[in-house]
């Protein structure tokens, strides 16, 4: 049996060495390394501690750095991620126009400054005109964009990711050294994972 080759060859999942992956715009594609669930993780790692909040995990890595541990071989990994969307207030067409005017004013100020640099005459007037025109267009676009949602999202919010726990991991060959450095840190001992 001969293997197919060329641009019309079909890609087959699980093909060895990526031989049957089609060519992409940047050249020949290669099969992903590892289990296909993310980037290659590099050398094996060991969790040296788990902490309830980010500042505690950050303090551990900072202590390692202060004691000349090669922190480029460590990472803070947040687990049990939760998306929290905090509602900030009601969004009306007027508020959308006001927010758009603010954004547009900043952009108009930037453009006005660019043109003002090369203006021989009254450069302050050029900057102010850019600011005003930017604010007007920003207000128009903000109001129109909100009106086009048809009331589907009449609130403003801010989203953030929060982790339930933060693990400090290091390369396996450096785990004993990291634990030795951490034994001198004055904070409650974390739960160790094996």
Image (cartoon, rainbow, N blue to C red):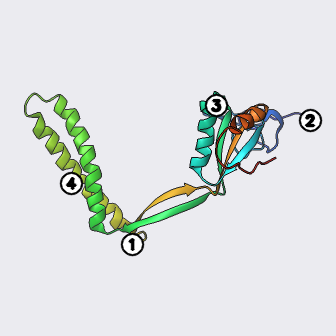
User: Which of the two residues, 76 or 105, is positioned nearer the viewer here?
Assistant: 76
Question: Is label 2 in a helix, a strand or a loop?
Answer: loop
Q: Where does label 4 land, which residue?
A: 136
Crowd class of label 2 (few under 14; some 14 to 19; many from 20; radius 10 Å): few
Q: Is residue 188 above or below residue 111?
A: below
Foreground disc of the pair 2, 1: 1
State the image coordinates of residue 159 (x, y, percent, origin top left).
49, 58
Label 3 Cα neighbours within 10 Å, binned few <14 / some 14-19 / many ≥20: few
The label on residue 72 is 3
The vertical placement of 90 against 97, above or below, is below
- Quarter of the view holding residue 174: top right
Element under disc 4: helix
Considering depth in this image, is 94 or 158 the residue closer to the camera? 158
* Residue 169, horizontal then vertical, whole percent: 70, 41
Label 1 crowding class (10 Å Cα cut-off): few <14, some 14-19, many 20+? few
Q: Earlier in the sequence, mark 4 or mark 1?
A: 4
State the residue position of label 2. Answer: 1
Mark 2 → mark 1, Cα distance in angstroms? 61 Å
Q: Secondary structure at mark 1?
A: loop
> What label sits on residue 40 in the rendered view?
none
């Amino acid at each position: 049996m001969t293997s197919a080759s060329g641009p019309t060859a079909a890609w087959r999942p699980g093909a060895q060495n990526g031989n049957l992956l089609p060519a992409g715009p940047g050249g020949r594609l290669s099969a992903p390394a590892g289990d296909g669930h993310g980037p290659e993780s590099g050398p094996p790692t060991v969790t040296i501690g788990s902490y309830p909040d980010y500042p505690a995990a950050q303090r551990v890595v900072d202590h390692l750095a202060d004691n000349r541990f090669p922190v480029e071989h460590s990472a803070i990994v947040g687990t049990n991620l939760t998306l929290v969307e905090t509602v900030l207030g009601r969004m009306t067409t007027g508020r959308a126009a006001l927010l758009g005017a603010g954004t547009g004013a900043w952009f108009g100020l930037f453009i006005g400054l660019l043109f003002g640099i090369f203006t021989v005459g009254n450069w302050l007037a050029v900057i102010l005109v850019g600011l005003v025109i930017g604010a007007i267009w920003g207000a128009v676009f903000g109001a129109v964009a909100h009106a086009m949602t048809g009331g589907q999202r009449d609130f403003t919010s801010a989203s953030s990711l929060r982790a339930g726990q933060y693990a400090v991991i290091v390369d396996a060959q450096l785990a004993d050294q990291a634990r030795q450095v951490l034994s001198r840190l004055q904070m409650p001992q974390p739960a160790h994972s094996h």
